[in-house]
Image (cartoon, grey):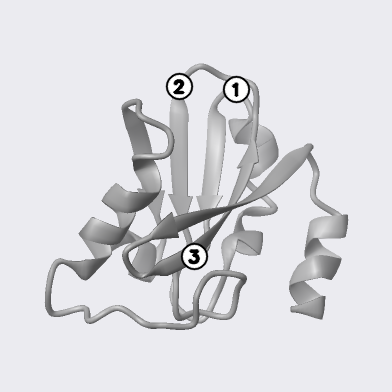
Amino acid sequence: MSYYDDILKRWPIPYKSRMVETRYGDTHILEMGDGEELLVLLHGSTSNSSMWIGEVSYLKKYKILAIDIPGEPNRSTEERFDLEDDSFSLWVEDCMKHYDKPFHLVGNSLGAG
């Protein structure tokens, strides 16, 4: 987590750190950007939202949500999803009910699954 914190100290645009409750446990979200349109970023396996450090400056025209996937090395719950059922999509649904608006979804590796 100290490595994650070090990366966030170099984050190129202002952000807020937020925890939201889901049926799978607490989920950590980095919120940033000024736009009306919502853009959700989901990282890959064995990673966290800090992987988007190089992209967020180019995307700041959106309201960006970089969401830490549970069970990976990040600030969300440590419980992993069963990738054979609909747990992952239900988790995304739980996260997004806190924002109540349409969104664009960008995923890398596991986050695109």
User: What SS does tag 3 mark?
Assistant: strand
Q: Which mark is residue 27?
A: none
Q: Secondary structure at mark 2?
A: loop
According to the picture, the residue beneath numbered tag 2 turns out to be 37
In this rendering, does residue 105 appear at all? no
**In screen coordinates, is 14 left or right of 73?**
right
Q: Earlier in the sequence, mark 3 or mark 2?
A: 3
Give the quarter of the image for residue 88: bottom left
x and y percentages locating residue 99 in the rendered image: 42, 33
Q: Which percent across, then down, holds residue 66?
A: 54, 50
* Residue contact at pointers 2 and 1, CB within 8 angstroms: yes
The front one of 96 and 109 is: 96
Q: Which residue is mark 1?
A: 61
> Label 3, label 2: how many angstroms apart (C-alpha)?
24 Å
Instruction: Locate residue 6, reporting x and y percent.
Output: 85, 68
Residue 26: mark: 3
Residue 98 place in picture, x, y as percent: 42, 39
- SS of the residue under disc 1: loop
